Amino acid sequence: MKTLTVTAGLVLIAVMSNTMAAAEKPAIEKQAKQTSKVKQTQQMQHRRRAKQFALAGAEGATITLWKPDLTKIPLEQKHLMHGTITLPPSGLDNYHAIVAEKDWGDVKESVIRYEYLRGKPSKNSPTILSAAQKTEFEIVPDPIPRGHFQYHTDLEWNFITRFKGKPVPNLPVVFETTNGSRIETKSDNDGNVTITIPTDFPDMVPGKRDRRSADFMLSAEYKDSGINYQSALSGEYRVSRMNWRSVGWGSFVMVIGMVAGGFIGRSRKNKRT
Amino acid sequence: MNPLKNLSVIRKLVQIAAFALLVYGSSLGAYHLADKLTHALPALSCAFDHNGSDICALIPVQHQLGHRLGPVITSGGDILMGLMPTLITLGTFLFFFIFLNKAFCGWICPLGTFQEFMYMLGQKLGLQPTENVDQKIVRKGRPIKWFMLLFLIFVFPLLSGVGFVNHDLMDPFCKICPSRFITTLANGDASQLHVDTASTTTIVLTVIADFLFGLVIVLSLTVRQPFCRICPILALNAVFRKLGLLRLIKNASSRCDKCGLCAKACPMDIEEIHTEMEKKNVLFEDCTLCGRCVEFCPEQDVLQMKYTVIPVFSADPKYFKDRNKAQKKWEKNNLMAKLGNNRKPAGDSPA
């Protein structure tokens, strides 16, 4: 599993500075220098500013923006300034995939991140994007987070390891977060990996809203025909809302409502009688 | 009576199928269902239900007013551009609404289905359901749905978007909508039944939501369609009801004065369907096009459901006779009767 750490260092530096203990930073930053990484620095969904991501180790990497209709926009030097990629407008709404690839000959590295960009309705399902082969070896979320269903702590999510479009069974994978968590597991016979996103934000206060986010990386390595394929999936997760929501109290209030309903029904019945 | 000739049975079957599609749709295997069918359904289907195949029009409208129009107003941008997403949603809503009109409420809505089945449970338990709600209460309650539509769907999200009220009021109706609980609980997810302590606003809204849900569960055992009476989508549907192709027509006869069975059969207690003698179009604002008034009208063709000009279901004395008999048989067969309680059978048989 040692080799997995090569691709497992894809982290968000800006998010780490908010959430990670100072002692953990240097090690992660060192890893971050070793390979390509995608970092989201701004999220301006509602104001429609271009999304930006920091890409460390971008030298020699091919970066492509996959649109929901599976057409591609190659990202050029003008999109990459000081290690930060600015995503160009794709003209389409829906989920896009940012794919960074590096070919070392006997080693092929890739990192993929799915992001929502705004534009005209694409008329394409995000499932088409996740099903498409974007790089030879890849890890895809099943499903892509969407709507109210996003990655958050204490949530189980399924991923699929795929080589040339076919699931890779029994493959060791590593899940790492910028908060310092690390989970090692294996894909099952169908290439599925189920991960429970750890509750690892420091200093969480129960009952208090917490809008922090962090990044995770799910990485794996696969060897075929003498080539070592290393791939990672990057994504953002948040503190679970259940941290400041109480189902117990909710159920209690519902029971009060039921009792009130019973009283109303009863008083109406007595009135009729 | 052959159950497959009973309009209420047919409607229940359609309701069950619609419930399965809207609440469990994406688990049926077709990914297009997981992507949601219209994003502007004229019925309460919730976005918090991850397995659902559609979401109601009220969800995008609230978000678009808050996230799109609000910022455009504050930044002095092009109002029409800010309003465009909402107009597109309402246009999509209208496109689907035209085909079924308010039957989306009476035949499709998952929350309406839940309330109807709860009422049937009440009947089977012999809970002596309230035959008709007092007309004074019905009349006083009618404006509530318009206030819900105006303030919870349009005003608060917009005020939140321009920054006059806090962000937690961006989607106030979703926060109190009982459909959120029904659809998520139906998928084994109890997390929506919560009190949210993020802010005072969320505490107030979630407490109202939980209380309202409990109230709706118990009231629907004895009162027909309690939440539908205040539902903002009923109001939104009412705005466009004259554009729908499915209509409810009355050809009043002199005997209508004495009868009134249609109003008694109406789950929304619309008395006007009985008293209206002039207008032909009796699709009133509270009507859900369930067709019960037509079923229980004993006069030939006095009440009709028409698709454009084609009658699809008409009042018929023979149908009325059989339907009434079937209803009484259904009501008699309840738990209380089996336990030997001799009180009057529970039920809503109008005749």
Image (tube, helix red, strand yellow):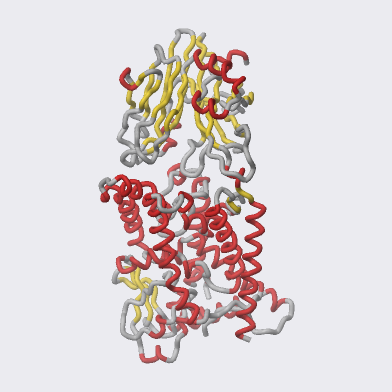
In x, y percent, where is residue A155? 59, 38
Name the residue nearer the viewer: A84 or B303.
A84
Q: Quadrant of residue A94?
A: top left
Kindly give the residue lying farthest to the right in the view shown. B339
Residue for point 54% across, 59% down: B178
Q: Is residue A71 visible?
A: yes
Residue for point 35% across, 49% down: B70
Residue for point 41% across, 70% down: B289
Q: Vertically, is B112 above or below A56?
A: below
In x, y percent, where is residue A239? 57, 38
In x, y percent, where is residue A90? 32, 32
Q: Is residue A160 visible?
A: no
In x, y percent, where is residue A69? 35, 34
Kindly give the residue lying farthest to the front in the view shown. B164
Q: Vertically, is A45 above or below B246?
A: above
Name the residue nearer the viewer: B278 or A192.
B278
Name the residue nearer the viewer: A142 or B246.
A142
Counting labels gives 0
Q: Vertically, is B139 above or below A215?
A: below
Name the residue nearer the viewer: A132 or B301.
A132
Residue for point 63% across, 86% down: A273
Q: Quadrant of residue A159?
A: top right
